[in-house]
Image (spheres, helix red, strand yellow):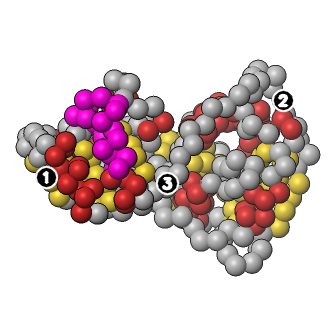
Amino acid sequence: MTTLVIAEHDNKELKGATLNALAAATKIGADIDLLVMGVDCATVVTAAQNVSGVSRVLVADHGCYGEQLAENVALLVAELGVDYRHVLAPATTHGKNVMPRVAALLDVSQISEIIDVLSVDTFKRPIYAGNAIATVQSDDRVKVITVRCSSFDAVAQADSVSASVVVLPQQHDAGLSVFVSASLAVSDRPELTDAKVVISGGRGLQNGDNFSLIYAVADKLNAAVGASRAAVDAGFVPNDMQVGQTGKIVSPDLYIAVGISGAIQHLAGMKDSKVIVAINNDEEAPIFQIADYGLVADLFTALPELESVL
C-alpha cells in the first residue's frame, strides 16, 4: 500500500506545506511517493529526495506543467492515482484548486482539510468554521485528501539523498486554460502561513494608512502581517493578507490580534496559535474569550508604546 503526495513548489524550492502534508502521509503508515510536476525543477527534485520518509520521487518535468495549471496537473494526478490507496496534497490555494478535479476524475469523494489520521480510512476534519470536529470514514477505493498544514508538524529533511527518482513521460495539456501572467506581492517579511509570529489588524485600524502601526511592530518582531476579512473587504490591505476560514490558516507561536473583534470566520483561521494576544478597546469583544493575554486599550496608543519598548 503506497500513498501519493503532491509536492508544492515554484520550480526552484520545495514549499514547506509539502512537508506538513508528508507528515500526514506518514501517519497513514504506507510507503510514500512524492510527485513533482513542473519545468526545469531539478533543484526541487533534489530537495524532495532528501525528505525523510519519501521512498520515490516521481518527476514530470514538461512544459505543460510549468505553471502547474490545475486543468493539466489534475489529469496526471488522476491517471497515477488509480494505483494508490491515498492521494494527498496541502490544503493551500493550489491544493484546493487541483484536488477536487482529481476526485471528480476518479469518481470519488474528497476529504477536505484533515487535522488528524485515525486509521487508513478514518480521519478528523473541522466543520462549522472549526466549532465542531467530524470523524470521517471513507470506503472509496482511492482516498483523495487535502491536509490542513497547521495541524501537522513538518517532517525533517535528511542529510543525505535517500529516495529514488522515477521520470514520468506523460504530458497532459487539457487545452482549457493558458497562463497569462502572475502578479506576486514581494515582501521582506516572513510568509504568513510559515511565520512563527503573526500580527494582524482589523476594522479597528479605520483605514489602510494606519496599518503602518502594524508594520512597525512587525518589523521589530520579524513577524508576518495579516488582516481580518473586515479589513480586507474595506480595502485596507490586499486579500492575500486575510487570515480566516476564507483566507489563510495560521498557527504561529505568537499571534497578536489588533482591533479585531473575533468573528467566527477569523477565529477559524488562527485559534490553533500557541499564544494569542488581543488588543481591543471593547472589553466584551469575542476575541478575548480565546486570547491567552488581553489588553483593553486604544490601539493607537498601545501599538506605538509596544514598538518603543521592543
Rendered residue at 89%/54% (across/down): 167
Q: How far apart are the alpha carbons under marks 1 and 2?
A: 54 Å
Residue 99: name its quadrant: top right
**Quadrant in the picture for the C terminus:** bottom left
**Which residue reaches farthest top?**
176
Mark 2 or 3, nearer chain start: 2
Amino acid tagged 3 = Pro
Closest to the observer, 150 or 146: 150
Q: Quick one: SS at disc 3?
A: loop
Q: How far apart are the alpha carbons under marks 2 and 3?
A: 34 Å
Residue 204 counted in the magenta span: yes
Q: Which residue is mark 1?
A: 295
Rendered residue at 83%/45% (across/down): 39
Amino acid tagged 1 = Leu
In the figure, 13 relative to 228: above or below? below
Closest to the observer, 116 or 13: 13
What's the mark number on residue 173? 2
Q: Which residue is mark 3?
A: 190
In the figure, 72 relative to 59: above or below? above
What's the mark number on residue 265? none
Is any part of residue 44 visible from this angle?
Answer: yes
Q: Quick one: SS at disc 2?
A: loop
The crowding category of the residue bearing disc 3, from other C-alpha atoms within 10 Å (few below 14, some 14 to 19, many at least 20), is: some
Mark 1 or 3, nearer chain start: 3
The crowding category of the residue bearing disc 2, from other C-alpha atoms within 10 Å (few below 14, some 14 to 19, many at least 20), is: some
**Quadrant in the picture for the N terminus:** bottom right
- C-beta proximity under 8 Å, tags 1 and 2: no
